[in-house]
Image: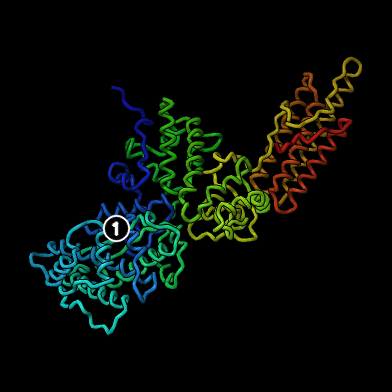
Amino acid sequence: MTVPSPVERLYFGYEDAERDMTSGLLRPGFIRTTSYEAAISGRKMLVIGRKGSGKSAICMQLVANSDSTVLVTPDDAAGDEIRRFELQGLTGDTAKSLIWRYAFAIQAARHLVTHAGTHGWRTPSAVRALRRFLRANGEAAGERLYDRLANGVQGLQGSLSLEAFGVKAALDVARPSEGARAARQLEVVERGVADAFDALGCADTHAPLLLLVDQLEQVWSSDPDSHAMVIGLLLAAKHVTGRYGRALRCLLFLRSDIYDTLTFAEGDKFHGDELRIQWTGETLRELALGRARASIGDELTPQRLWGEVFPRVTDGEDTVDRLFRHCLPRPRDVIQYLNLCRDIAVQNRHQAITEEDVLQATRQFSEWKLQDLAKEYLVAHPYLGRLPLLFENTGYIVTRSSLEGRFTEVADTLHGAFPDYAEVLTPSGVIDTLYSVGFLGVRRGTDVVYTGGAQLPVQQHELEFHIHPCFRPALGCTKPTPLRSYAPGQPYPGTVTQLSGHRSSGSDAGSAVGRDFALLDRLSRSCDSVQRQVGRAAGLPDDTRVQVLRQITRVKSRSADVLLRLRSGMPMDAGAEVMEAATYFTTLAAQLRESHIDDGNSTDSLVRKLEEEAGRLGRALGGSLGSSGYSNN
């Protein structure tokens, strides 16, 4: 029997926490991050993160590691009940907080009725009262959240049976409004639950009951009722945590794009409860190694994983650095990307993942993520799928002015397709949106900052933006600026050659060789002059600076090689080399001007320098050059 290779055994788990917990690697490969430790400590109530950031993984781990958890995951029917719930005399936020409080009270009551047996053989009267209440109101059986919410809606809008707590149906409130009557009934139920917790001494004898609310995004849409549903949940969670003391805790798992859209008067009171999930490159590498070890074996070292199973270098870059730079900083992306590398290697029948496997996976992964980005934010930004088209086949560095120029060409089309979003479909609005979803980063000092955590929104004075490496291959934006590489011997589209080098023979040979040396010396000095100007171009983006310097270095290296060959007696056409370089300088100047890569004057100075040096080289050749060789077509 053939033993499977490490690549065949390699697996990083499922992309969703539910399957990964039951049949994947969430249990053996789980990383106890600072976010997880803060969640179990009780110091935080709101776990906030992007889709795929690991919220549900923390939730599933808490469920698996505790006997006292209740998981609440609304489905469409339950969400519809909450969104439609109203009470006369109360705002939408307050009314929806009452239905959430009712659902939490029922969850706690059902738990207490079952849990009481662990505290002794005799059931306290407060627990027996809860049992009678549940039966009287049809809450003793059934597991669906929708059923409990439907009962709560009927009871709070009408009358609950409260005789189990010694209260008649008609409460002693003079001519109550619907909202006031519902709040009074709910207070009676919550007092009954609190009395049962106290009677059993739960707060002093064991860990609190955990109410976990997850996957709210499944029932959320960008409308006022959905906002009120989430705000009501926040208000209810804070209320019940205070009402039941140390006996019960609420932990809410919310997508950041939902939470950050909420605006309500009590919002400032929740900042201390927020726990925003943040992943660093180090913790993501730890996660990848842990999952790889769970599939291959504990003996797997980082050096073996990133040097033998994966290639050590890919496209001239350290592979592990490249992999984690090309995915958004969240576990789901890492799992998808690394699994894809493995799958392609297996399909190609490789015993180890090769450089070509990684490059192929990178292109496929980039296409996935570009599609997924539009789907992830479809509710909040339905126009998002159209915006990446502004960046196809360009450089990955974008300035504010160049984006304004591109946007102007499509503004009418976007406004016609999405008239309700015309106010945000402006150049600044597009930048803000693309930054908030992680598509664009902004240059701040020497770093490019992508959104996450406590990062500031884009400021008006910030002019340089970078497309995230994750999306560059799918868009054809793999270079900082769309500049043509120097490739001697390959014609530039649109070039009209008017001059060629001249090689003499016989008595003219000596003078011709002397002229060749002079031409190559002139070319070398032109390269030096351009390089100095690149260094002085303060406003030129660093990546573009490196890109231009690399091409000028290639020109100079080629010139030096031709010079060495001439000195060794080999016949070389120095005039053709100089003409090639001069034409390239003209082409490079035109492309830099067209790219609008710098919102200041640095690029203009560099463009002029390139054109000046191209002219000097042309005069040294004894004539003028043809077209720039640059074409927009």
Q: Quadrant of residue 595?
A: top right
The quadrant of the rendering that contains the C terminus is top right
Spot the residue most to the right: 507
Q: Is residue 590 left or right of residue 462?
A: right
Name the image quarter holding residue 138.
bottom left
Residue extending farthest to the left is 121
Residue occupying the point 32% across, 55% down: 75
Camera sees residue 208: no
What's the amino acid at mark 1? Val
Front residue of this view, candidates 134 and 190: 134
Q: Is residue 381 above or below residue 233?
A: above
Task: Say which residue appears at 32% left-offset and 71% top-offset.
Answer: 239
Q: Give above or below for 623 relative to 212.
A: above
**In the depicted view, which residue is nearer to us: 569 or 206?**
206
Image location of residue 100, percent across then percent down: 31, 66
Residue 99 seen from this side: yes
**What residue appears at the point 37 percent right and 66 percent down from the top-left corner?**
234
Residue of label 1: 72
Q: Quadrant of residue 40?
A: bottom left
| SS under mark 1 | strand
